[in-house]
Image (tube, grey):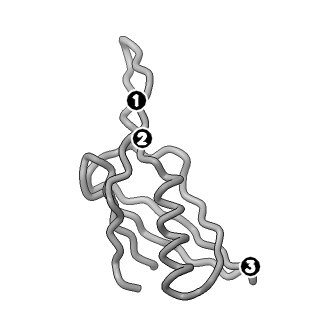
Amino acid sequence: MTPTTMSPTGTTPTTSHPVARRAASLNTARVASSIKESITIGRGIDVTVSCPPYVPTEVGRTFTCTATAANGKTTIFSVTIEDRGGGVRFTSE
């Protein structure tokens, strides 16, 4: 599958603590939606997509999401964060 770049998704603000601070989290629900849309439009297949609930927005960080078709077939997508605004690129493995 051709790599796909998604427009910046923004970040989810987190609460800070004087001692420990959690990095901003990528909006992975939007990443899942973008992968689903790409498969639906590109292949005409309806799928559900799951991504981790918390991924720090760090340029270069890679994580995986899983697309599952109605027949149970799964496809793993490698997702790479491309910029601090939350833009990502994803490809199927």
Label 1 sits on what residue type? Answer: Arg
Question: Which of the two labelled residues, at mark 1 and mark 3, occupies the earlier sequence position?
Answer: 1
Question: Which of the two labelled residues, at mark 3 and mark 2, occupies the earlier sequence position?
Answer: 2
Residue 5 vs 22, above or below: the answer is below
Q: Which numbered tag is attached to residue 70?
A: 3
Residue 72, position in %: x, y? Answer: 73, 79
Helix, strand, or loop for circle 3? loop
Residue 45, position in %: x, y? Answer: 62, 84
- Residue at the front extreme of this rendering: 41
Q: Quadrant of residue 60?
A: bottom left
User: From the viewer's perspective, is 80 left or right of 53?
Assistant: left
> Are discs 1 and 2 less than 8 Å apart at CB?
yes
Residue 31, position in %: x, y? Answer: 46, 59
Structural distance between the alpha carbons of marks 1 and 2: 8 Å
Q: Residue at 37% x, 24% y: name it.
A: 21
Structural distance between the alpha carbons of marks 1 and 3: 36 Å
Label 2 sits on what residue type? Answer: Ser
Residue 12 vs 50, above or below: the answer is above
- Residue at the right extreme of this rendering: 71
Q: Which numbered tag is attached to residue 25?
A: 2
**What residue is disc 1 on?**
22
Structural distance between the alpha carbons of marks 3 and 2: 30 Å
Q: Which numbered tag is attached to residue 14?
A: none
Q: Residue at 36% x, 11% y: name it.
A: 18
Q: Residue at 32% x, 54% y: name it.
A: 8
Which image quarter holds the N terminus?
A: bottom left
Which image quarter holds the C terminus?
A: bottom left
